Image (cartoon, rainbow, N blue to C red):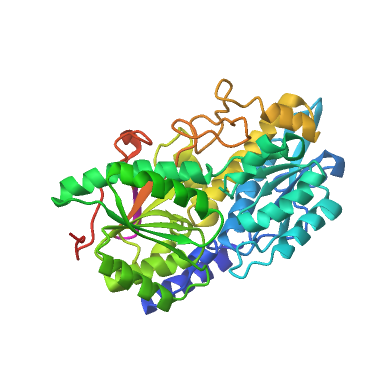
């Protein structure tokens, strides 16, 4: 995007902030240098202008391209492809190849989900673009339908957005059909739940010590969607083992309004909750945080809120997210030797922090470059066999988000430090996010950047 256009947008945003206008900046990336997502058109960022079509390895990107999840997948792929192509591409045999990208919109982030839009996008991808492999996925209900179209064509699908356990369980249950399905981001829902439990095991002790009173009352607030069910089951089973009393478990529609949230928060306050644990992937997370601040609920928010991973969330909520603790893949800390450099480079390109799906897509492109060169082939079965060699005994070390990367037998991402582990960050005064401690249980304290802060209106007894 031209510098003049970027400057105009930035000025408009600043004026809006001063005027107190609530602009949902988290719904878009702020004036990315690469411009808007291009749908249905093959692009070859960084490749020579005269590259022959038979020297382009086509990456199909499937996702909800007008929402942050699909944008994240596209831009993660785009940045990695641009870097690899600019550096001269990669080899298959003695020939040089370059990555190309083509995207189709599945509309799977829509509140009123229409699964046929996803299957239509996948069908168009397979019949018109003929990609060598696919990256993307997000909403479980949609991905379950359109993955079948990709599996029927025996094309590799790298899931970088959907956490539901079933996508990798299928590899165990029906290997011949689903062996082409791999997940690189995020860890599965059950493991995400386990990491949240680990946080809460530490958080309860820290809050009790720092506030001088027992902190053990929690309410779970989750989207009424399939992906939250495995996590919810894990949380309800194991949180009580660590002394937490679950006062309520609230599934809500992703079409919930501000009024719905105001009522929900009043009920939570009446229960005397000390922590609210969200499991939210959509834009209603903005309403959760905004209403929290308006009612001054006497608790902390700590859990999964995908929208809150974006730097623009502070403006989306008018600062209402202060003190909220969220899980995200990266922050500007030395999680790996390349994390800070990647983070700064991403901000320079997009003016916004990278969503988990963006990091996973970026890492996946670099992984696929190595895999293609290692097996000297682009045949799907050859790629599967090579990917299956990335194990804890033979990990990949090129990821910007994990010190080591490996797959499990079910083609899922290996979890636990130094493999796939989320960070817990807290929104603090002035709109900065700081990495908080897990007492070494999830990640080392060497990457922690600040202690926990609490709302001025206090925490329930």
Which region is colored magenta? 430-434
Q: Nearer the viewer, residue 311 or 416?
A: 416
Q: Position of residue 213 (x, y in %)?
A: 15, 52
Magenta part mainly helix, strand or loop? strand
Rendered position, 414 above or below 162:
above
The answer to which image quadrant residue 68 occupies is: bottom right
Residue 227 x, y percent position in the rendering:
55, 53
Q: Residue furthest left?
A: 212
Question: Going 29% across and 73% down the picture, which residue do you hit?
Answer: 295
- Indicate whether 160 appears above or below 335: below
Residue 116 in sight here = yes
In the image, is 149 to the left or to the right of 12? right
Where is residue 62 drawn, in percent x and y?
69, 54
Residue 450 visible in the current orientation? no
Q: Position of residue 265 (x, y in %)?
A: 34, 70
Which of 14/77 is in front? 77
Q: Image point 59% across, 31% down: which residue?
A: 408
Q: Residue furthest top?
A: 393
Q: Quadrant of residue 174?
A: top right
Residue 292 shown in magenta = no
Q: Confirm whether the magenta stretch covers residue 433.
A: yes
Q: Name the residue rendered at 49%, 64% in the picture.
A: 26
């Amino acid at each position: 995007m031209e510098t003049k256009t970027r400057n105009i947008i930035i000025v408009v945003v600043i004026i809006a902030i001063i005027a107190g206008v609530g602009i949902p900046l988290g719904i878009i990336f702020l004036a990315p240098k690469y411009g808007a997502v291009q749908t249905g058109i093959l692009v070859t960022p960084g490749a020579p202008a005269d590259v022959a079509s038979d020297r382009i390895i086509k990456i199909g990107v499937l996702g909800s391209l007008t929402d942050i999840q699909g944008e994240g997948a596209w831009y993660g792929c785009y940045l990695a492809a641009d870097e690899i192509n600019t550096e001269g591409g990669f080899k298959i045999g003695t020939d040089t190849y370059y990555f190309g990208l083509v995207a189709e919109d599945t509309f799977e982030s829509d509140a009123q989900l229409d699964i046929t839009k996803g299957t239509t996008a996948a069908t168009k991808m397979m019949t018109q673009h003929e990609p060598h492999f696919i990256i993307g996925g997000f909403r479980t209900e949609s991905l379950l339908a359109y993955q079948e179209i990709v599996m029927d064509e025996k094309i590799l699908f790298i899931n970088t957005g959907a956490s539901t356990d079933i996508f990798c369980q299928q590899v165990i249950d029906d290997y011949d059909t689903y062996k082409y399905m791999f997940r690189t981001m995020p860890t599965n829902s059950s493991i995400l739940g386990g990491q949240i439990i680990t946080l809460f095991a530490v958080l309860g002790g820290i809050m009790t010590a720092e506030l001088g009173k027992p902190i053990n009352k929690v309410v779970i607030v989750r989207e009424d969607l399939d992906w939250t069910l495995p996590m919810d089951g894990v949380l309800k089973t194991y949180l009580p083992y660590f002394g937490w009393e679950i006062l309520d478990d609230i599934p809500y529609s992703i079409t919930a309004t501000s009024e719905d949230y105001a009522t929900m928060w009043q009920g939570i306050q009446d229960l005397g909750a000390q922590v609210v644990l969200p499991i939210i992937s959509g834009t209603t997370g903005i309403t959760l945080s905004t209403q929290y601040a308006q009612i001054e609920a006497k608790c902390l928010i700590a859990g999964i809120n995908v929208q809150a991973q974006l730097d623009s969330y502070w403006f989306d909520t008018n600062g209402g997210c202060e003190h909220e603790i969220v899980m995200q893949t990266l922050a500007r800390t030395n999680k790996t030797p390349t994390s800070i450099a990647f983070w700064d480079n991403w901000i320079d390109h997009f003016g916004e922090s990278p969503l988990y799906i963006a990091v996973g897509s970026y890492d996946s492109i670099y992984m696929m470059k190595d895999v293609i060169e290692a097996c000297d082939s682009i045949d799907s079965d050859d790629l599967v066999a090579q990917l299956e060699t990335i194990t804890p005994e033979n990990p990949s070390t090129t990821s910007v988000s994990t010190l080591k990367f490996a797959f499990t037998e079910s083609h899922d991402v290996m979890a636990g430090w130094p493999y796939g582990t989320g960070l817990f960050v807290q929104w603090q005064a002035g709109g900065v996010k700081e990495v908080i401690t897990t007492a070494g249980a999830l990640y080392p304290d060497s990457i922690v950047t600040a202690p926990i802060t609490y709302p001025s209106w206090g925490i329930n007894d």
